[in-house]
Amino acid sequence: MLNFVLFKNKSTHVNLKRKQGATVLLHIGASIQEPIAAQGPFVMHTQSEINKAIQDYNMGKFGFINE
């Protein structure tokens, strides 16, 4: 399960607890005041951009890893 959390800029500290086996990715940066849409591993500005990214991914436009 993946979750996305956006915190308000009201503090200078963040305390995180995670369950055993969980992975946490914390990104800190200045807010650019733009809309956010997220689904799976994709984060874009709109749902239509997400849909296009998923379509591009399914068509192999993101490249391939040769194993």
Image: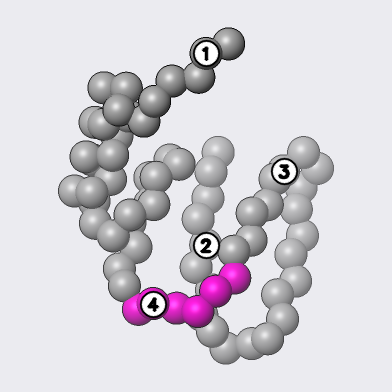
**Foreground tag (2 vs 1):** 1
- Mark 1 or mark 3, whichever is nearer to me: 1
Q: Amino acid at mark 1?
A: Asn
| Distance from Cα at disc 1 to Cα at disc 4 | 37 Å
Crowding at dot 1, Cα within 10 Å, few <14 / some 14-19 / many 20+, comes out as few
Asked if the residue under mark 3 is in contact with the one under mark 1, i.e. CB atoms within 8 Å, the reply is: no
Q: Is residue 56 magenta?
A: no
Q: In terms of sequence position, does the residue under pointer 4 or pointer 2 come before the other?
A: 2
Residue 65 locus on image (x, y percent): 50, 19
- The first of marks 2 and 3 along the sequence is 2
Inter-mark Cα distance, 1 to 3: 28 Å
Q: Which of pointers 1 and 4 lies earlier in the amino acid sequence?
A: 4
> Disc 2 to disc 1, how far (Cα)?
33 Å
Name the N-terminal-most of marks 1 and 3. 3
Mark carried by residue 22: 3
From which residue to which does the magenta span run?
28-33
Q: Residue lying furthest top in this view?
A: 67
Give the residue pinned by disc 4: 32
Q: Which mark is residue 66?
A: 1
Residue 29 visible in the current orientation: yes
Going by the picture, which residue comes out furthest to the left?
48
> Nearer the observer, disc 4 or disc 2?
4
Q: Secondary structure at mark 1?
A: loop
Q: Amino acid at mark 3?
A: Ala
Whole-percent x, y for residue 45 in the image: 28, 60
Q: Is residue 42 left or right of residue 30?
A: left
Element under disc 4: loop
Q: Are marks 2 and 3 in contact (CB under 8 Å)?
A: no
Identified at 50% across, 68% down, the residue is 6
The amino acid pointed to by label 2 is: Val
For discs 4 and 3, the disc positioned in front in the rendered view: 4
Q: Which residue is mark 2?
A: 5
